[in-house]
Image: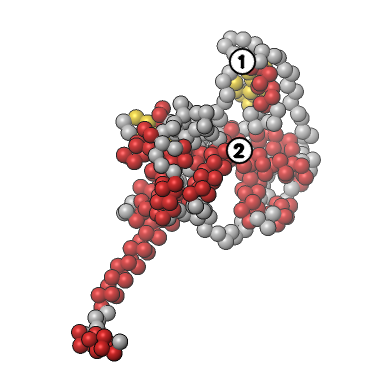
Amino acid sequence: MADMPIQLPPHVHVQRSRHGKVVFYFRRGHGKRTRLPPPTDKRFEAIYAQCLAGQAPRYEEEKAGIETLAWLVQQWRQSSDWLQTSVATRKQRENILKHVLEKSGKVPFRAITAAHIRQGREDRMATPAAANNFLKTMRALFGWAKDAQHVRDNPAEGVKFLKVETDGFIPWTMKDVERYRARWPLGTRPRLAFEILFNTGLRRGDAVRLGRQHVRDDIAFLKAEKTGVDLTIPVNATLRQAIEAGPCGDLAFISSATGRPLAKESFGNFFREWCEAAGVKASAHGIRKLAASLLAESGGSEEELQAYFGWQSVGQSAVYTKAASRKAKALNAARKLSGNIPSPSPSLTQEKVREG
């Protein structure tokens, strides 16, 4: 897991009690402390807004029955294991846990077996990706619980993932790039967003955070939201031209019409609309796949792809380097084959012309 501290709103602080419990509170300057629920709690925003307004709301922690799955999840949310994962990972897990707890929150967590986990996977078999995400979350939950000595074994550890018959996001083609650029000229928000994605290879969650504060001497330095890996990305002439043409926000290059930063989900919706208007049937992540393919075909090594795109496993970069190698070998073989095919003799060609 990425060692990434949680990003807290202004005046929100976190500390660990003498019992090892993580506690959040609101304090402006040297003023009075007001206890807050964890930022992942659905009540956080409302209570935080009251604090900002100068009110003193009373927060009482909802106590789940000890020994229940809901209690175990509550403890997990207050642990460093939870807080040090990326915002995107926590959000995905929250969506999964919400449905799990609605159904099984009162179940004693020590009574949960591999059979229960397997049944949860089977209940989601119609959408294999969702089934596997459920399994990943259960493995992480009980993996932490085992480390914290709440359980002896991880019941999700031996449950197999479902096979997903998909190549993932459809990669863009250079024809898509030409079509999109023709529809959206420099100086438009859609064009700026595209050039950032295409020329940096960033995931959309990182692309919407990129701003002038990250760039020094035409090099962008950014920590990947998903993995916590430090990224070093040159700002090439094409990207520099797009940024200069704008329009850019104050805190991030990609922004709303009013100049405010965008959440990656909102940006994804906007970008989908811009693609449809350009006649491109692909996603923002498909641009990242095209960029990886182009870099591999240009001779980029697996290590270079890993560093540039922030991947942590050789398997991810190997997909592109192997594909580039196969493509190069196929083209080379085709050239050799075409060189060994005899051309028709002049007399035969003239004969064919007379027959025609």
Q: Which residue is mark 2?
A: 90
Residue at numbered disc 1: 27
Instruction: From the top left corner, tell me how far across and down residue 234 is, in percent.
Output: 34, 38
Task: Describe residue 186's horizontal placement relative to residue 72 as left or right.
Answer: left
Q: Which mark is residue 309?
A: none
Q: Are marks 1 and 2 in contact (CB under 8 Å)?
A: no
Residue 31 figure quarter: top right
Q: Is residue 243 visible?
A: no
Residue 320, quarter of the rendered image: bottom left
Helix, strand or loop at label 2? It is helix
Residue 217 pos. (x, y %): 31, 31
Front in this rendered view, residue 240 or 58? 240
Considering every residue shown, the one lying at the far top of the view is 30
Q: Residue 134, how many percent across, how many down?
A: 65, 48
Distance between the Cα atoms at labels 1 and 2?
25 Å
Q: Earlier in the sequence, mark 1 or mark 2?
A: 1
